[in-house]
Amino acid sequence: MPKPFKTDQSKKQFQVARKHLVGGVNSPVRAFKGVGGTPIFFARGKGPYLIDVDGNRYLDLVGSWGPLILGHADTAVLNLVRRTLRKGLTFGAPSPLETQLAILVKKAFHSMDKVRFVSSGTEAVLSVLRLARAATQKKRIIKFDGCYHGHGDSLLVAAGSGAATLGLPDSPGVPEEFASLTLSLPYNDLASVEAAFSKYNDIAAVIVEPVAGNMGLVPPKPGFLEGLRKMTSQNNALLILDEVMTGFRVAYGGAQELYGIKPDLTTLGKIIGGGMPVGAYGGRDELMAQVAPEGLVYQAGTLSGNPVAMAAGIATLKQLADGALYRRLEESAAFVEGGIKRTIQKTGVAAVFQRVGSMATLFFCHHSVENYAQAKDCDRQNYASFFWAMARRGVYIPPSQFEAWFFSGALTKEHLKKIVKATEESLQETPFNSGGVANA
Ligand code: KE4
């Protein structure tokens, strides 16, 4: 049985926070609506660990939603950030570190001739959609149900992640005029994309999570990405790979390296900031040359390319460049996958574990998950029970069925064994809904 799990301080923190911050949080998924109970407030992180304000220590499988592929407070990252901090926080003017990070990004993402840094994934997506519409002189965008591309108006249509968790996939406040220009289709369904291109001649772009992480982890079916590439090329539309989550995660060159797909434009975020606020978009010269100040497509940002954030990104990517960490992450995640699948077999719990590299999700349902409708079929109460059973055992997984787990390089074999053990105990101890446990 897990040791007593204190939550008084988190409860106190939440009570105060709710008086001043909307919902007590600065991003909805942190409010724990997906799992119930009081959100956990964290005091610090180090390596594979998060420590909360009650002193509970967790092996962290969220990694701040993806950025912390090296783990928390990585020494080399902190050292370069400290050295950079001493020279000032921001200049609002070009600095060498921005060029340094852009060169590192381009070495990994060969589809990018030019890069533009912004301060979040949302900003990268907003910018790239504006560019795509300007470059094609067309207005309509195709996205996929359950994919989340940040909270820009055009993209809050059948959105995943926190929007799905809160049941707000189509947010109020998005004018019908905007939403009508976004077509959201079932993920992994090429026929629906083909039908859309037959029906509309004003499709500017298809934007896709090349590995979906925001409905839980849903891999692209063989041929799906290749089909999108072919159909966009044939219809003078742009293919945008939203690699905010997969960039430098599923491979150093992201999903476009893993699956051999060359997009017209790419968005990045998370890992390229190493834990600091950085987003980016990029693509071939003829497209990026249309962005101000070279072109007319306007996009700007006070803290874009912030030197301290650039330093965190540079120190992170430099530790990923030789590829060794990806081999280790693959072994780590495969080890945990094996343990979890054996436990599912043994317990008969209705659950499916899906993974691409060091991104994964345990879905509480009877079948594999290939799209958002199937993800919504999962038993979210069982997920919530499992979340708390794991938390009490010192493992922090995402507080929502519609999110992905992220393994970090800070996890050792001992840590991985603890994760497997916690999963075994949690899946055996948790009183899953009857629908969730066959032959209970
Ligand atoms: P940000 O604006 O949150 O930096 O990035 C938006 C975004 C864009 N594209 C993809 C594929 C993303 O996954 C995200 C953000 N991911 C979520 C986690 N699923 C951020 C966590 C949150 O919203 O608090």
Image (cartoon, helix red, strand yellow):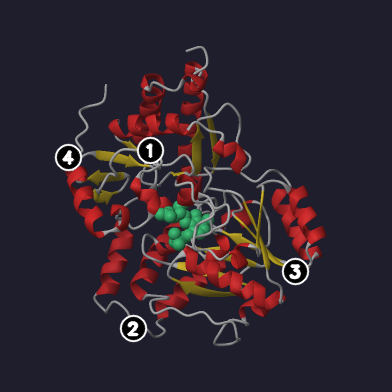
Cα separation between marks 1 and 3:
41 Å
Of residues 172 and 162, which is closer to you in this image? Answer: 172
Marking on residue 35: 1
Q: In which quarter of the image is the N terminus?
A: top left
Position in image of residue 200 (x %, y %)? 78, 63
Q: Please identify the quarter of the rendering in which residue 310 is found.
A: bottom left
Residue 110 seen from this side: no
- Residue at x 77% of width, y 69% of height: 236
Cα separation between marks 2 and 4:
42 Å
Residue 157 seen from this side: yes
Position in image of residue 407 (x %, y %)? 43, 44
Marking on residue 227: none
Q: Do the residues labelled 3 and 4 touch (CB within 8 Å)?
A: no
Comparing labels 2 and 4, the label whose residue is closer to the camera = 4
Secondary element under disc 4, as helix, strand or loop, is helix
Q: Give amino acid for label 2.
A: Phe
Q: Give amino acid for label 1.
A: Val
Q: Name the residue under label 4.
A: 8
Instruction: Determine whether, in the image, residue 235 is placed left or right of residue 181.
Output: right
Q: Do the residues labelled 2 and 4 touch (CB within 8 Å)?
A: no
